[in-house]
Amino acid sequence: MSLFLSRLRLGKEGLVRRSSLLILSNGLSSSSLHQSPPCNILGAKPCGEGLGKLIIKNANERDPTEPEKKVPMELVYNNHGNDTIVGASHGWIATLKNDGILRLQDDLNPYASYTEPKHIPLPPLVTMRHCQTKIITNVSMSSSFPDDDETCVVAAKFLGAQLSFCKPASQSCKPEWTNIRIKNPCFYSSRVVFSKKEEMFRIVGYGGHLIGSWDPCKPSEDPKLQTLHFQKLPKLPKSTRELMDSCCKSERLVESPTGETFLVKMYRKTAEISKGGIAKMKTRALMVFKIDEEGNAVYTQDIGDLVIFLSDSEPFCALAASFPGLHSNHVEFLEAFNEVAYIDLSGHAFISYIDSHFPAYYIPPQKI
């Protein structure tokens, strides 16, 4: 426990409790030589001409790192200007400008060139009837190379019924959006993720009982559906159940490097109200389920040598053994202008605090 806390070096008081059944914040019960460690952005030091020197925090280190990378300050500190970040995947951010063009940019990738940043404008968005393309839930990509991988597909999930696909590097024809209307409303507010194992884009429905999968090569309005059957649920005391019932609930799908699929259920509640009347949320409980091919979702407190990273970027897993200093069997969580959380799934630590000073994007390991 003491080693875990010293690694974090929190500047604010965290919540540390034990739980034998459910991870609760209130105590109710490859090789790293070839890849960079997972990291998140702490900020940037101004260095002139609207640029700043990037400051990052590697997940396996306790102190910040300043790589030789300069980034536009407005991308780090102003997410409400001309460039609005609407998602991130594989170290790329997606911005939606006032001109309505969705762009992929590698500006915030610490290991991408700052002298020659890559900006990939995608075709103009086409709004389907009775849908909207102003509010994007998130963006997912099938590979890390949307600039030169002809097979790379970008999926944009909009709030509501529209799901759109595009191949930015297509050479056989001019890139264009393929738009799909989602029929089941349970997917309207959910995020899209790409499964390397299934080679499909997947969305978990609200409540976590249904997963829809869309083939990027043959987009269809009739996705492959998988019903989940929850198993080995812990027996919880009445007070715990009441707490969870009072929380806002959300679900995230994430796939490990070895092809395992996990469903993370988060239970969050208002912790404070800011001066502007904005509710600050904190995670009060978290459950992880391992999903097999038959749709069995088995509750677990042991994901082995894995760490799950959840943020406003596409979620991912990393192998702790590949990055000395990274603690296995953990979930790490960031949310923009809101919460930072570190959860030991064995029940030994649950640390959560409010912080609003950095973009909320975990960057997965990059080839170096």
Image: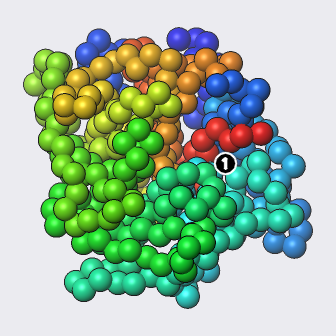
Q: Could you tell me if residue 275 is visible in this image?
A: no
Residue at (37, 65) in percent of width and height: 157
- Using the image as rendered, state which of residue 80 and residue 367 is in the foreground: 367
In this view, 255 is above or below 222? above
Three-letter residue code for mark 1: Ile
In this view, 164 is above or below 176? above
Q: Residues within 10 Å of mark 1 (few under 14, many from 20)?
A: many
In this view, 88 is above or below 304? below
Left or right, 330 with respect to 213, comes to right
Q: Image quadrant of residue 191?
A: bottom left
Residue found at the very far front of the displayed protein:
172
Indicate the position of residue 108 as horizontal and vertical percent values: 69, 56
Residue at (24, 23) in percent of width and height: 299
> How many labels, in total?
1
Residue at (75, 49) in percent of width and height: 110
Residue at (26, 28) in percent of width and height: 292
Which quadrant would the C terminus be assigned to in this image?
A: top right
Left or right, 105 with respect to 18, comes to right
Left or right, 193 with respect to 151, comes to left
Q: Which residue is mark 1?
A: 41
Left or right, 58 with respect to 155, comes to right
SS under mark 1:
strand
In this view, 114 is above or below 35? below
Indicate the position of residue 239 as horizontal and vertical percent values: 15, 26
Q: How has the structure been colored for display?
A: rainbow
Indicate the position of residue 164 as horizontal and vertical percent values: 38, 70
Q: Image quadrant of residue 237?
A: top left
Indicate the position of residue 139 as horizontal and vertical percent values: 46, 61
